[in-house]
Image (tube, grey):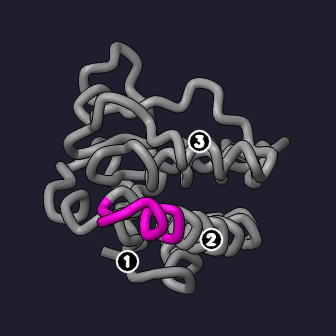
Amino acid sequence: MNPRPTAVLFLSTGNAARGLMAEALLRHLGEDRFVAFSAGYAPLAKASPRALRILGDNAIFTGGLTPKSWIDFFESPRSILVDIIVTLSEEAQQHCPAWPGDPVRVHWPVGDPLAALNEDECESKIRSCYESLRNKVGTLIKQRAPHSAIELMLQLRSIAAIV
């Protein structure tokens, strides 16, 4: 019998690029071992077209990817049991609330690809963000299924700092 998939919640500031890309990458690469969600501290009104385009260009499904607030997870009639919270921005790390079930927290600092001064810089930042997240998600999925919270923490420590 397969163990329950590991639930990962990616938290960013606006949940319009970083969080959505991480969620889509883990859903795509993680197969049935992971369940991925994303949310933002101060979610933007819509997803970044550049983020959706780079995912689509890499044959990653983008249907249903929209910015969400992490408050929505608390107000949901169905509580989502999260095993890992990954903060992707300094704001998300600083403001992340106490989470039910005491999930393991890890910080993967990724620069905001939407904070660019011009079109060329924005394109460069979105590609850099995608590559960074793809590498981190790729490392996460290569880990064997952990048998305990401590083993999970040790695996995550190999990718980034536990917070």
Q: Is residue 12 left or right of residue 125?
A: left
Quarter of the image where one finds residue 140: bottom right
Cα separation, mark 2 vs mark 3, equals: 14 Å
Q: Which of the pair 130/36 is nearer the observer?
A: 130
* Left or right of residue 90, residue 54 in this image: right
- In the picture shown, does residue 35 fall above or below 137? above
Number of other residues with Cα within 10 Å of mark 2, as a class: few under 14, some 14 to 19, many 20 or more? few
Q: Quadrant of residue 4?
A: top right
Please give left or right for residue 59 compared with residue 6 in the image: right
The amino acid type of the residue labelled 2 equals Glu
Main secondary structure type of the part rendered in magenta: helix
User: In which image quadrant can residue 38 be found?
Assistant: top left
| Neighbours of disc 3 within 10 Å: few (<14), some (14-19), many (20+) | many
Bounds of the magenta span?
A: 115-124
Check the image and name the residue furthest to the bottom: 158
SS of the residue under disc 3: helix
Q: Nearer the viewer, residue 133 or 143?
A: 133
Amino acid beneath label 1? Ile
Q: Amino acid at mark 3?
A: Leu
| Residue drawn at the location 65% of the way across and 66% of the way down | 134
Question: Could you tell me how far apart the alpha carbons at marks 1 and 3 are, in whole angstroms?
Answer: 29 Å
Left or right: residue 147 compared with residue 33: left
